[in-house]
Image (cartoon, rainbow, N blue to C red):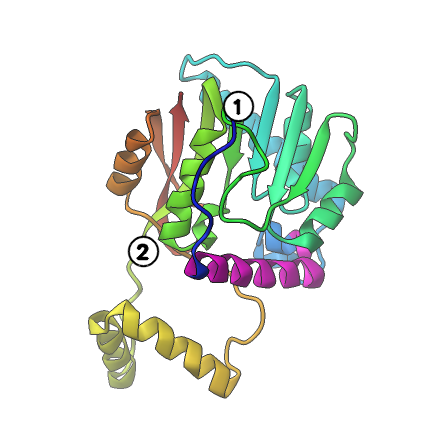
Amino acid sequence: MRSNCRGPTPAESMNIKRLRRHWDALGKIDPLWANLTNDDKRGGKWDAEEFFLTGEQEIDEVMGSVESLSVTFKHDRALDFGCGVGRLTQALAARFDEVWGVDIAPSMIELANRYNRHPGTCRYYLNDRSDLERFDDGSFDFIYSNIVLQHMQPKDQRRYLGELVRVLAPGGIFVFQLPSAPLPLPDPKGLWQRLKRRIKSITPSLVLVPYRRVRRELTGVGRGPRMDMWGLPEHEVRRYVASLGVKVISVTPDSMAFGWSGFRYVVGR
C-alpha cells in the first residue's frame, strides 16, 4: 500500500525545485566531487575506481557497525536515498538481492546508470517529489542515507524521514546521518568582523535568509549551485523518529558535515 500523504504545498514544491536545480547543476559541473567533497578532488580530480572504492569501504564499515548491535534483518531489498552517481548503491548491490538508488538530480541519475555495474539487481529512480510515492509501504529491508538529508531544510528533513520510515519493512533497519548543531567558529579578528558576527547572531532567520537571497540576486555573490547545510538537534530527531513508530537502536557521533557536530542514527521497525 502506498502512502496517502497529502501532496506537497507550494512552499515544499519550491524547496524541492531549488534543491533539484542546484544538484542537477553540480552533477553537470563536478559530479564525483559533489558526491564526496574531498578538498584535493575538486575540479574532476576523482579517479572513478578510487571514488567507488570509498563506497565499498563505507558500506563495509556501516554493515559491520550494524552487525555489532546484534540486530538481524533480511538482505532482500535495499534503498540508497540520495544516491548521487551511485557511490554507495553499487556497494550495496554486492550485499542485497535488489537495490534501488533514488536521487533528485537528473544529471546524477544519468551518470549513476552509466556507472552501474549491476544492471540486473541495481536500479536508479529520479524522484523530484517531497515524498517517495513510487514505493509501497514496507518495501525495503535496509535503507541508508549519508550526507544527504543535511542539504534539506528541517521541514523537508522531517517529511523525508517520515517517508523513509514508511517504506521500511517490518524487521528492517534504517541508517542515516544528520548534523545537529554548527561548531563554534574561531573568534573573529577586528572590530568589523566581530560586529558582523554580533549582528548575525541577533538577527532572526526569517529576516536573514530573505536578505541573503536578495543580496545574491543584486550582487551575483553566491549565484550558481550551492550546498546549503541544515541540521536537527539530536533530541528532536530522537523524538520525531519515535513518533513515527520505530525504535532508535543506536546514536553515535558523526563528523561528515564540515563545520557541524552530528550523529549517525540506526533505527529499526
Disc 1 marks a residue whose amino acid type is: Met
The quadrant in which residue 75 appears is: top right
- Which quadrant holds the C terminus? top left
10 Å crowding of disc 1: few (<14), some (14-19), many (20+)? few
- Of residues 235 and 91, the one drawn nearer to the viewer in this rendering: 235
From mark 1 to mark 2, how far is it between C-alphas?
28 Å
Tell whether position 14 is magenta: yes
10 Å crowding of disc 2: few (<14), some (14-19), many (20+)? few
Q: Is residue 90 visible?
A: yes
Give the vertical position of 175 relative to 190 (above or below): above
Residue drawn at point x = 63 percent, y = 47 percent: 84
Residue 222 x, y percent position in the rendering? 51, 75
Residue 12 is left or right of residue 47, and the answer is left
**Magenta: main secondary structure:** helix
The quadrant in which residue 166 appears is: top left
Boundaries of the magenta span: 11-32
Give the vertical position of 205 relative to 88 (above or below): below
Residue drawn at point x = 78 percent, y = 33 percent: 117
Give the vertical position of 18 relative to 216 (above or below): above
The residue beneath circle 2 is 183
The quadrant in which residue 212 appears is: bottom left
Q: Secondary structure at mark 2?
A: loop
Q: Earlier in the sequence, mark 1 or mark 2?
A: 1
Residue drawn at point x = 68 percent, y = 60 percent: 30
Residue drawn at point x = 71 percent, y = 34 percent: 123
Disc 2 marks a residue whose amino acid type is: Leu
Q: Secondary structure at mark 1?
A: helix
Residue 141 x, y percent position in the rendering? 53, 21
Tell whether position 253 is magenta: no
Q: Which mark is residue 63?
A: 1
Residue 189 is left or right of residue 157, and the answer is left
Q: Nearer the viewer, mark 1 or mark 2?
A: 1
